[in-house]
Image: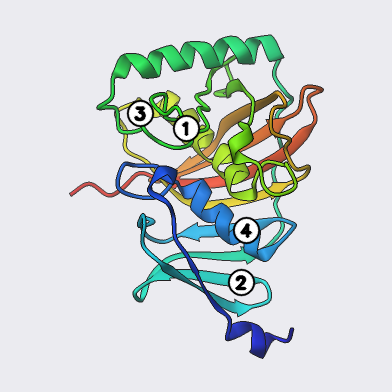
């Protein structure tokens, strides 16, 4: 398909309300993963330009064979393009340490109660029985957060592997959680960009480790990384992310 034909393609995407991040908008990883799935295998970078509306048909417009945009009645929501990912991933943590860190983080989240802004997030919400339930906790002194995690069977695609959207969602929240460990849980931060690659599709029902770590801060800009390891410590998926501290007032 040539570029002229590709650019005329228009599809629609609807983010089901259960795939929320904040209570009124979509989980950034899930929304970005929808666009990454359309672009196919390889590394994809997704810029999130506005909160992702829920239960609203949005237009996916192909700009060329490697770039798509997502808009809601003329408002640009996201732009995705194929790119390369440069990211130095830390060594996989000890599985037992990751297990303990995640269990403690779950308890801390539960203590914040249902009014906690992320209590019902599809990716990291402790109060969600139908979410991913990835709540990593700190390990060591390098700012890394980690948890053990088993992808639920309900998130499988037609081949029995974890769906691309769910994998991106699994990569999302740990970056923000790593920064909140440094900035304080009351700090408001939002996902602005995810660049990710799935090195090996995840298998539902298998045990993995998820980590997140801060990379650098530039004013309101927070750079972070996340990765998913298999039981042997091999990287299965990874992402570099940009989060923002919203301007006050």
Q: Position of residue 186 (x, y in %)?
A: 29, 28
Quadrant containing the N terminus in the rendered view: bottom right
Q: Position of residue 77 (x, y in %)?
A: 41, 64
Tag 3 near tag 4, CB within 8 Å:
no
Report, in whole angstroms, how far the alpha carbon at label 3 lies from the one at label 2: 33 Å
Q: What residue is shown at x 42% (from left), y 24% (from top)?
A: 126
Q: Which residue is mark 3?
A: 119
Report, in whole angstroms, how far the alpha carbon at label 1 lies from the one at label 2: 32 Å
Report, in whole angstroms, how far the alpha carbon at label 4 lies from the one at label 2: 10 Å
The image shows residue 38, relative to residue 214, as above or below, that is below
Q: Nearer the viewer, mark 1 or mark 2?
A: 1
Q: Which residue is mark 1?
A: 130
Tag 1 near tag 2, CB within 8 Å:
no
Quadrant of residue 182 within the rendered picture:
top left
Q: Which residue is mark 4?
A: 36
The residue tagged with tag 4: helix, strand or loop? helix
The residue tagged with tag 2: helix, strand or loop? strand
Is tag 1's residue or tag 2's residue first in the polypeptide sequence? 2
Q: Which residue is mark 2?
A: 67
Q: Give left or right: position of 155 versus 200.
A: left
Is tag 4's residue or tag 1's residue first in the polypeptide sequence? 4
Q: What residue is shown at x 67% (from left), y 47% (from top)?
A: 157
Q: Nearer the viewer, mark 1 or mark 3?
A: 1
Task: Residue 225: tell me if it is visible.
Answer: no
């Amino acid at each position: 398909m040539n570029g002229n034909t590709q650019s005329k393609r228009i599809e629609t995407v609807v983010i089901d309300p259960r795939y929320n991040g904040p209570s009124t908008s979509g989980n950034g990883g899930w929304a970005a993963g929808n666009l990454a799935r359309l672009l196919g295998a390889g590394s994809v970078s997704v810029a999130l330009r506005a909160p992702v509306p829920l239960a609203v048909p949005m237009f996916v417009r192909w700009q060329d064979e490697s770039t798509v945009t997502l808009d809601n009645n003329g408002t640009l929501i996201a732009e995705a393009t194929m790119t390369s990912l440069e990211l130095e991933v830390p060594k996989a943590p000890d599985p037992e340490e990751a297990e303990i860190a995640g269990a403690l983080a779950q308890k801390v989240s539960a203590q914040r109660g249902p009014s906690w802004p992320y209590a019902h997030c599809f990716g990291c919400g402790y109060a969600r029985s139908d979410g991913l339930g990835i709540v990593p906790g700190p390990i060591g002194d390098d700012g890394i957060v980690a948890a053990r995690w088993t992808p639920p069977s309900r998130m499988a695609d037609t081949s029995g592997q974890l769906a691309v959207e769910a994998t991106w969602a699994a990569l999302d929240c740990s970056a923000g959680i790593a920064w909140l460990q440094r900035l304080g849980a009351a700090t408001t931060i939002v996902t602005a960009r995810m660049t990710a690659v799935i090195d090996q599709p995840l298998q539902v029902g298998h045990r993995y480790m998820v980590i997140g770590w801060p990379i650098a801060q530039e004013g309101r800009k927070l750079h972070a990384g996340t990765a998913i390891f298999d039981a042997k410590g091999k990287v299965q998926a990874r992402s570099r992310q940009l989060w923002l501290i919203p301007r006050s007032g």
